[in-house]
Amino acid sequence: MEFNPLRPSRDWRLSEAFYLALHQWPFMLIFCLVGALLGLVASDLWPAVFRTRAEIYVGLNPYRAYSDSWFIARAYPQYTNVDDYKNWQMSQLSAAILTDEVIDATMADLRQEDAYWKEVDNDRLRGMLRAEWRTAGTWTLLADSRNAKRSNQAVRSWSRTVVRRVEEAVLAAEQIAEIDERMRTIIGEQTKTAVQEQDLQTSQRLLQEWLGQAGDLPADQPLSQEQRWEILYLTGRVAQFSPGWLELLEKQPGESALPEVYIDWIEQILVAIEGEAPLLAQRADFLEQQRLELQEEYDRLVKVSLGLSPNLVVKGLEKTLPEVLRSTIQLVILGAIGGLLLWVIWLLAMITWPKVKL
């Protein structure tokens, strides 16, 4: 029976076993070389990955957050402070830079630069790209590829497209704010015109009713104070600041005027109302047409704006050369380390397990 000198025996000591094991360095070298060779083979089967970085600056003016009517309309009541506004915008931007629109534009740019990209689809390009950010400030755009040239092309084109597209979105958001103010003004004018039309119709009806009852009034007695103020109120609520209306208002009867004077004056007022009604209707139609045109432009700009704030600023910064994430040397070293670990495991097995040859 032959025993392994490394296994435990009556006079066996751990220090002696390790001493003998370490003198078997040729085996250690063989394990390391085999592991390195396996790492070399793996590097051929599993090529290196390169990463290129591009930095962009993202700025946001939080003090104008609550002047952003688009934000207020969409955010209330979910967001109630400036931090929510900032986080909302950062999330919007993070999603926007990987939208189909941005990827399509990036791909079109790449295909003009290199015919290689004609064989690449959008999903594959999107899988290469990633953004690293914490908050407003410096954002890092990353592109990973097994080819250093491709990762460099991808991140350069993507960063250019992102900056260009976000600038367009911010400009659209600024125009949205302007159009929103104009629409508010027009809607206010529409409300005012609708009230004037309603007042005109009401005063016309009440004045006609008064004329129908005027024959019952004493012809030789002036109107009572209450009757006179009622007529002046009905005419005053529809009067416009035009020369014709001002001339009519100057002709209003005095307190001692008889009913026939009021009848004649009211008939002139009704003629003026009949002339004013079509003008108000035309103004209402004109205002509605303006509102519809602005609404159409507003809807178009909303799509262009990507939901971003006019207070957002994005600029391109420096770009870095590709870095190797996984190289042949790294895989060879990892293989050698793996071989060393296997040698250690083999030693432990030799020490703890008896090897008997009969």
Image (spheres, rainbow, N blue to C red):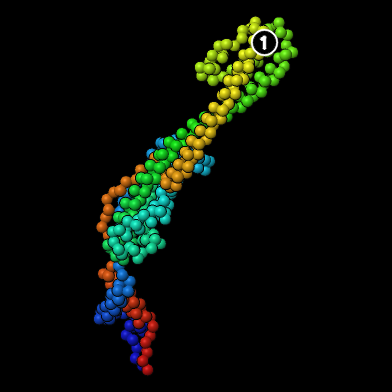
| Extreme residue toward the bottom, this view | 358
Tell me the quadrant of the picture where the C terminus can be found. Answer: bottom left
Q: Is residue 95 above or below residue 212?
A: below
Q: Is residue 287 left or right of residue 150?
A: right
Which residue is the site of mark 1?
260
Q: Position of residue 331 (x, y in %)?
A: 30, 70
Horizontal and vertical percent for residue 255? Answer: 63, 7
Image quarter of residue 27: bottom left
Residue 86 position within the rendered picture, expressed as x and y whole percent measured from the top left: 42, 43
Position of residue 243 relative to residue 160, above or below, is: above
- The quadrant of the picture occupied by the N terminus is bottom left
Of 352 and 283, the residue lying toward us: 283
Q: How many marks?
A: 1
Can residue 293 be seen at all in this image of the molecule?
Answer: yes
What residue do we see at 30% from left, 58% from top?
112
- Three-letter code, disc 1: Glu
The part of the image, by quadrant, that contains residue 245 is: top right
Quarter location, residue 107: bottom left
| Vertical position of residue 344 compared to residue 73: above or below | below
* Residue 26: percent from left, percent from top: 25, 81
Q: Secondary structure at mark 1?
A: helix
Task: Confirm whether residue 340 shows in the render.
Answer: no
Q: What residue is drawn where x is 36% and y is 48%?
A: 165
Q: Residue visible at 61% across and 7% down? A: 254
Judged left or right of residue 3, residue 70 is: right
Label 1, residues with CA under 10 Å away: few <14, some 14-19, many ≥20: some
Give the residue drawn at x 29%, y 61%: 114
Report whether 328 appears left or right of 66. Answer: left
Residue sitting nearer the eye, 223 or 22: 223
Q: Is residue 235 above or below residue 52?
A: above
Q: Nearer the viewer, residue 179 or 197?
A: 197
